[in-house]
Amino acid sequence: MSVLNAEECLAPLRELPKPDISIFSENTWRTMAQWAVNCIKNHPKCNPTTEKAPWYPTRLLDVQYLASSDPVAQLTASMFNMSTGHFPANCRLIETKDTPPEDFYITLSHRWPAQGGISARLEKSNIEQMKEFIPHDILPPTFQDAILVARCLNIRYIWIDSLCIIQDSSEDWTKEAQTMGDVYANSLLTLCGTAALDILIPLRNPERIHPCIVKSTWENAPNHEFVITDFQFWKDRIYSSPCNKRAWITQERWLSPRILHFTFDQMVWECRTHEASETFPLGLPKQVRANKHTGFKFPGNSRILGLQQDDEKEGNRYLHDWYRVLETYGRSEVTFEKDRLVAIAGVAQIFASLLQDTFLAGLWQSHLPGTLLWSVHKGLRSNHPLAPPSLAAGELVGRNPTYHVTESSRLASYEAPSWSWASVSGDIEPGYLTPLSSKESMIELRSAQINALDPTLPFGRIHSAHLILRGLLYPLSMDPPNWPAHLPAWSREPPTIYISGQAKTKVEILEGTWVEKYSHVVHIRPDQPEEYSDIARACFLPVARATFEREGHEMGGLKLVYGLCVLSTGRQGEYRRLGRVDFSGEQCDLFERGLRKLRGVREDEGTEFKMDGKDLYLPEEIGTFKLI
């Protein structure tokens, strides 16, 4: 909860009508139409100037006949001369190559039911029938509402995934999934069922929408007006909404030029320039904007739209934009594991153009080896329940979220190599070395190979992939070697995992007091819970050194070593990733000293290191190995 000075945000609202209980009221739709018209007419970032011909999806739903093809004229046309709440949401399917659209189209972004799927589906057996007529009574309420919204906006066409992609054709699904980014990027507007209710548009309590205004009774400042608003407005309604747990929503929101969110209590507008709501129809106050968690207003959007960028560091900015996409995407869920890479293919394709780089199963080739250093971390994730119907009536039922600890796991099916974040489900922390650090690579990428299931779809599903790397592998050991794995976890201390060889060094902890410590203990961030016996059979692969160089910072000069824990597949020189390994500070010094001792390097005598453990590497060239 926060208190805003009324002079900053209330004065422009005084002349606006109060919201209605029905979203189909004239006042409500006039507000929404004004958002859209203002964006189309006044937002350069949201309206690219391009000479390209209009792009359309393979199929669209035709919901009405229109005489005008001008979007502003359509949005400002009289929309309220019909009883929309009872107007049947009939429509028909069109193939755009056979029936070229005469108008703009909008899209629907929604959460599929967790069980049972969607009954209204386009299939091989009913495609001809749906081209003739789709009766409203077979459509779920969310689809019916979306069609009514399109009609109220005088928009003739709408794209809905389950009605525009043949659901029982893997060939059609694969083809259409690769154009999903274009579908949303070229739509006039995306309707988002953000609350993930059974209907798109629930009845609302107008008192919850209208700003809460209070007058002060202080003796030295009587009758001053303040607006009480929800400090977590955006987070509760958008960022943490059930719909935003969908993996596909990352791409849909990032690429859509305009989004109309239907939340549990009101409509919220989002475009690349502006955010507004029914509570604040002229724009969210700066106090609310400063605390929103959109993550979708990236500088790269301007480049995508064809606008010029005057920034020498735009490449680094785009890379950081990608990391932000990845962080958001990593928190989301896919219904089908096969969608893990496909659901972000549209965004990846755009970033490949921006970065002028090669996409390697979720990583960028020119930024290896740093991008190998991603990790999966545990964290508290809120269990936001679906807003109960009573909430729309004004009760605060269910507003206190509960939390659970996120766990990661490898996907059951092969969708990506082990060195890619796409091979696991869990919260992803991107692997990159901050520009605040000077860094030195400790491995070399010799080659990379990605074998797509369909060679014509380079951003689609993967059949197999591997990297050929050159570096040093250090076998790991476990202390105690006979660690009692048969005992319950609560009754046993975890073993120490360390690099095999001369693994101890003397350390002075007090003046004259020395103890032996492991010189290079391995602290692993596993990609999924691993058996210690597997880790003890694995190898440590140093990837990069770094020094934190921010002057005056308490961490200034801190040494860092980043690496991976890899396990042999049983074939000579071939490994799969188990997790990430980090060292820092004093431990990093011990690690470096131990490595020199382990490798037989005597700097004072200039002794060169002679590599041992030839069986660790590929037989073709000592020091090279394959990571799959």
Image (cartoon, helix red, strand yellow):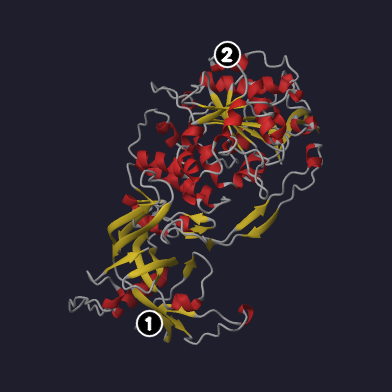
Picture quadrant of residue 277? top right
Q: Residue at x 60, y 47 (%)?
A: 245
The correct choice, above or below, for 613 with respect to 252 in the image is below
The correct choice, above or below, for 544 with respect to 601 in the image is above
SS assignment at label 1: loop
Q: Is residue 259 left or right of residue 394?
A: left
Residue 436 image position (x, y, % from top left): 38, 52
Residue 487 image position (x, y, % from top left): 60, 83
The circle on residue 189 is: none
Q: Residues within 10 Å of mark 2 (few under 14, many from 20)?
A: few
The correct choice, above or below, for 17 with respect to 210 in the image is above
SS assignment at label 2: helix
Q: Which residue in the structure is indicated by mark 1? A: 503
Q: Residue at x 49, y 31 (%)?
A: 58
The correct choice, above or below, for 559 with respect to 92 in the image is below
Residue 205 image position (x, y, % from top left): 79, 33
* Real-space CA distance between mark 1 and mark 2, rounded to the nearest whole angstrom: 76 Å
Q: Nearer the viewer, residue 549 or 478?
A: 478
Picture quadrant of residue 393? top right
Mark 1 and 2 residues: CB-CB less than 8 Å, in contact?
no
For residue 200, say whether it is visible: no
Tell me which numbered mark, 1 or 2, is placed earlier along the sequence. Answer: 2
Q: Residue at x 69, y 33 (%)?
A: 4
Figure quadrant of the C terminus: bottom left
Q: Which residue in the structure is indicated by mark 2? A: 73
Q: What count of labels does the image hold? A: 2
Circle 1: residue type: Ala
Circle 2: residue type: Ala
For residue 258, say whether it is visible: yes
